[in-house]
């Protein structure tokens, strides 16, 4: 059945307090839940209370200490008839954590017990109104074998502990009322890195990062990131932590990145563990970002939670924006912005233009897990970022202060957020609210005209039709722009224009000559801009735009424009040559511009991704895109062999550190290896093998191995084996070993993936491992889009085998197949066949069923 946003009604009962007693065991855990319920004066009265369950049976059940007069199972839910206004309900349930391969609810991971309750996992532990608008104060007692579970953790503060014989117990109390999805419990043999943080109000908070014994020396970066997050949220958003204890636990079997449970964040080990030998620069950044993200949820998510799951972007969009701003402040802001836009365009734009398109505040769903999407998260962040750009930082802060103040302790809506920003900033956001309601990436067609001394910019927007939304209204689009004087290379100041209607015209005086337009600077709006722009203007901007994002954009546009035209067969040999020469000149200028740091230089050197190029075409031919992209890479590699070489040599002399300079050096080195792999494979193998051998850090080593994995050679075999032997037993690094083979450009990549799926270290039970092999493969256009459909079959087979084990992870592999409408007819038919085959399988999970049926359309 479909759940619809418009059907929201408050729950008829309040559950002010809940007490849970866990008798812990890996195979059998007994849970006694006692809750006080009272009628909700703000809701329609109901003769019954519905307690959600998922695969549970009540072992015992009492109401006010006696029999429950009327109760029955309705599907998975327990429905109890209640007459008066206040009752105490006590229910015992029994669960088998070791048999829980879905990793939702209470499950076992490597001998420890942990939980994941968002969105609807709590109902796999206990019968309860498992919805985010029912807030309760939790007291939890847990007991279990001391040797097996020496550490017992829960939300809030520990209020008691004791032992008797082989067992021990701990009692925890969380003073902050919370919805069930924020409940968490951990029991296991763990050790902690401990530190402390004193808040701006003088509260001393104990901080712990809990991991398995051997992993302790890889937790420093996580702890430092946590302290920086706490400080930053005080300084930038005025938010202070509200408990005396903050625990983070790292778990190796985890469906997502991490979870913001009150006072007890649970993390995928991938976002906790790092040292230079085993983690790349990207991993370090990811850890800082995710630690920040989960910490920031304490206010944007926990203190103010969501009324219902349609409001998910209320906490996720806002928290992603907060973590993006945090990471920008901790490192290179322009590079962070470029990375964020790359993710948006690489993942969210395709989502928005495909069968799974949905607004950041969806209207309906079957399975909420399917809506933890790049749209809700990343586009959600962009929508709030636009409000921030229009208001300016200072007023935006007034808006967020008002929001936190007004809704603290509540389960709020996206509308509440927009209203608070409106009241706090003074912006009129009436039309802007359409960004919450309408799916699809707006397209802005732009024309620049010049007459006399006036430059005129004409803008017209369309929001494309998306499933269920054939007709759209125009949305306010804030665009930052600058007009450059060709001869001086300068502009007279950045402007922010808002395209509030379907079309508008903006005139600027004082230009004797037609200026060069820099548009959507900093990517001020998540739209695509369509304009005919002379290549010389792009070359101009790529060399001189003072907005680093716009400069990156010009480079991308230069290459994308060429590739799209080349793939479409629109270019004669002379035009090809002229375009390639221009791109090479622009790239050479980037290599030689000594005002750039290498981190930024690396961004400017990057080619647009296959998926971004495909996104620019109505119907994509993956084989041709791949071929043209590789040909351009080879051409640039050959033309720029000597400046690339000089840059590599300079970068190779910089010694390892985690600082920006050394990080930038590592980035350009591996990019250069990539160009060389296309232009001079033999030389690339030699250089990559050399980089691999002398690497004193994972970034260099992985970068070299990635390049080697795509090229047939003795070194390929040698280094892959060396890497495996060197890191065997370190799951996160072995994940990289799987991923870099699955994403390689090697002609036999499909054979490799098949062989890897039979490898002793491969298992469908661990989501990180599944992602490292199959998600990497599905994102590898060259392998996934093999012309005979073998890549599609491989993913369909995976989905069918994985679905009964871990439905959430299986469903996440469906979207790549859903792109069929935008792919040439031969492959499109094969993709549909793969989807049909999945759809025909008996007993599909709700997760996979929803994704497959929506993908088929
Ligand atoms: N709230 C978590 C995070 O962003 C994600 C949890 C998603 N869990 C799920 N089962 N879909 O930070
Ligand atoms: Zn989140």
Image (cartoon, rainbow, N blue to C red):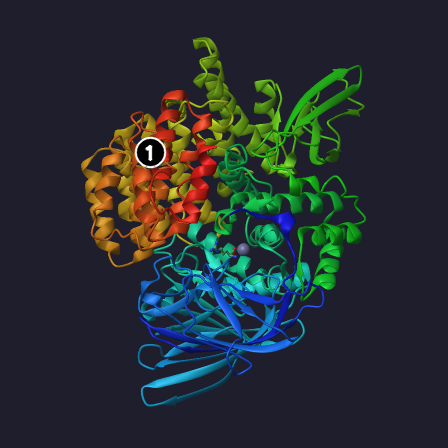
Residue 117 vs 169, above or below: the answer is: above
In terms of image quarters, where does ligand 2 lie? bottom right
**Image x and y of residue 582, in percent:** 50, 20
Residue 286 located left or right of residue 676:
right
Residue 567 located left or right of residue 435:
left
Q: Residue at x 57, y 28 (%)?
A: 554
Residue 220 vs 787, above or below: the answer is: below
Task: Categorize mark 1 by other alpha carbons within 10 Å: few (<14), some (14-19), many (20+).
Answer: many
Residue 535 vs 476, above or below: the answer is: above
Front-most of residues 159 and 541: 159
Residue 707 vs 319, above or below: the answer is: above
Residue 687 located left or right of residue 58:
left
* Mark 1 element type: helix
Residue under circle 1? Answer: 792
**Image x and y of residue 429, in percent:** 76, 43
Whether residue 371 can be seen here: yes
Looking at the rendering, which quadrant does residue 230 occupy? bottom right
């Amino acid at each position: 059945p479909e759940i619809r946003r418009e059907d929201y009604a408050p729950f008829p009962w309040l559950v002010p307090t809940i007490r849970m007693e866990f008798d812990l065991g890996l195979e059998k855990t007994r849970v006694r839940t006692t809750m006080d319920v009272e009628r909700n004066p703000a809701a329609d009265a109901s003769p019954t209370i519905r307690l959600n369950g998922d695969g549970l049976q009540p072992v015992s059940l009492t109401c006010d200490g006696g029999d429950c007069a009327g109760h029955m199972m309705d599907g998975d839910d327990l429905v109890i008839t209640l007459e008066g206004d206040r009752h105490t309900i006590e229910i015992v349930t029994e669960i088998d954590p070791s048999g829980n391969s879905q990793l939702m609810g209470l499950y076992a991971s490597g001998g420890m017990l942990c939980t994941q309750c968002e969105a609807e996992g709590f109902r796999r532990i206990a019968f309860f109104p498992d919805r985010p608008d029912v807030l309760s104060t939790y007291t939890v007692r847990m007991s279990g074998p001391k040797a097996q579970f020496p550490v017992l953790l829960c939300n809030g503060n520990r209020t008691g502990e004791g032992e008797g014989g082989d067992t021990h117990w701990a009692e925890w109390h969380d003073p902050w009322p919370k919805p069930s999805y924020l409940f968490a419990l951990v029991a296991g043999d763990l050790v902690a890195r401990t530190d402390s943080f004193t808040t701006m109000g003088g509260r001393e908070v104990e901080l712990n990062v809990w991991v398995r014994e051997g992993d302790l020396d890889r937790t420093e970066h996580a702890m430092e990131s946590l302290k920086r997050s706490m400080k930053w949220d005080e300084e930038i958003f005025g938010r202070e932590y509200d408990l005396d204890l903050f625990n983070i636990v790292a778990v190796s079997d985890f469906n997502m990145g991490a979870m913001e449970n009150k006072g007890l964040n649970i993390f995928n080990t991938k976002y906790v563990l790092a040292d230079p030998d085993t983690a790349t620069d990207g991993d370090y950044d990811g850890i800082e970002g995710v630690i920040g993200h989960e910490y920031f949820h304490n206010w944007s998510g926990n203190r103010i939670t969501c009324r219902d799951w349609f409001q998910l972007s209320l906490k996720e969009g806002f928290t992603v924006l907060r973590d993006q701003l945090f990471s920008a402040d901790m490192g290179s802001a322009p590079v962070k912005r470029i990375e964020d836009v790359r993710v948006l365009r690489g993942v969210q734009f395709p989502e928005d233009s495909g069968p799974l398109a949905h607004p950041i505040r969806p209207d309906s769903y079957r399975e909420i897990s399917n809506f933890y999407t790049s749209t809700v998260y990343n586009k959600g962040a962009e929508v709030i970022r636009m409000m921030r750009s229009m208001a300016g930082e200072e007023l935006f802060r007034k808006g967020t202060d008002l929001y936190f103040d007004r809704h603290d302790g509540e389960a709020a809506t996206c509308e509440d957020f927009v209203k608070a920003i409106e009241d706090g900033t003074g912006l009129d956001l009436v039309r802007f609210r359409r960004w919450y309601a309408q799916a699809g990436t707006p397209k802005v067609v732009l024309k620049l005209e010049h007459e006399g001394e006036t430059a005129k910019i004409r803008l017209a927007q369309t929001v494309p039709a998306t499933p269920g939304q054939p007709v759209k209204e125009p949305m306010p689009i804030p665009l930052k722009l600058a007009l450059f004087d060709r001869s001086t290379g300068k502009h007279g100041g950045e402007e922010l224009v808002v395209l509030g209607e379907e079309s508008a015209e903006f005139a600027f005086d004082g230009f004797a000559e037609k200026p060069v337009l820099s548009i959507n600077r900093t990517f001020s709006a998540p739209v695509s801009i369509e304009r005919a722009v002379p290549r010389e203007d792009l070359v101009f901007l790529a060399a001189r735009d003072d907005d680093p994002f716009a400069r990156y954009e010009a480079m991308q546009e230069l290459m994308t424009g060429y590739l799209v035209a080349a793939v479409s067969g629109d270019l004669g040999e002379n035009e090809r040559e002229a375009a390639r020469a221009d791109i090479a000149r622009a790239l050479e200028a980037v290599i030689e511009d000594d005002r750039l740091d290498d981190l930024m230089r690396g961004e400017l050197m990057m080619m647009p991704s296959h998926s971004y190029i495909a996104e620019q075409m109505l119907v994509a031919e993956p084989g041709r895109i791949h071929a043209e992209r590789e040909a351009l890479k080879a051409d640039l590699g050959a033309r720029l062999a000597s400046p690339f070489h000089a840059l590599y040599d300079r970068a190779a002399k910089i010694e390892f550190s985690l600082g920006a300079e050394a990080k930038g050096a590592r980035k350009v080195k591996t990019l250069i290896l990539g160009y060389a792999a296309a232009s001079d494979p033999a030389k690339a193998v030699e250089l990559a093998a050399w980089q691999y051998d002398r690497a004193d850090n994972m970034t260099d080593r992985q970068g070299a191995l990635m390049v080697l994995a795509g090229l047939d050679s003795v070194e390929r075999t040698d280094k892959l084996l060396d890497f495996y032997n060197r890191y065997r037993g370190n799951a996160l690094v072995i994940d990289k070993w799987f991923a870099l083979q699955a994403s390689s450009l090697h002609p036999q990549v499909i054979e490799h993936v098949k062989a890897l799926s039979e490898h002793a270290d491969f298992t469908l039970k661990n989501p990180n491992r599944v992602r490292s092999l199959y998600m990497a493969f599905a994102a590898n256009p060259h392998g996934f889009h093999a012309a005979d459909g073998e890549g599609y079959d491989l993913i369909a087979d995976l989905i069918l085998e994985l679905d009964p084990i871990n439905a959430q992870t299986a469903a996440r592999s469906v979207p790549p197949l859903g792109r069929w409408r935008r792919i040439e007819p031969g492959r499109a038919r094969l993709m549909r066949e793969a989807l049909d085959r999945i759809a025909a399988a008996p007993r599909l999970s709700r997760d996979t069923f929803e994704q497959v049926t929506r993908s088929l359309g």
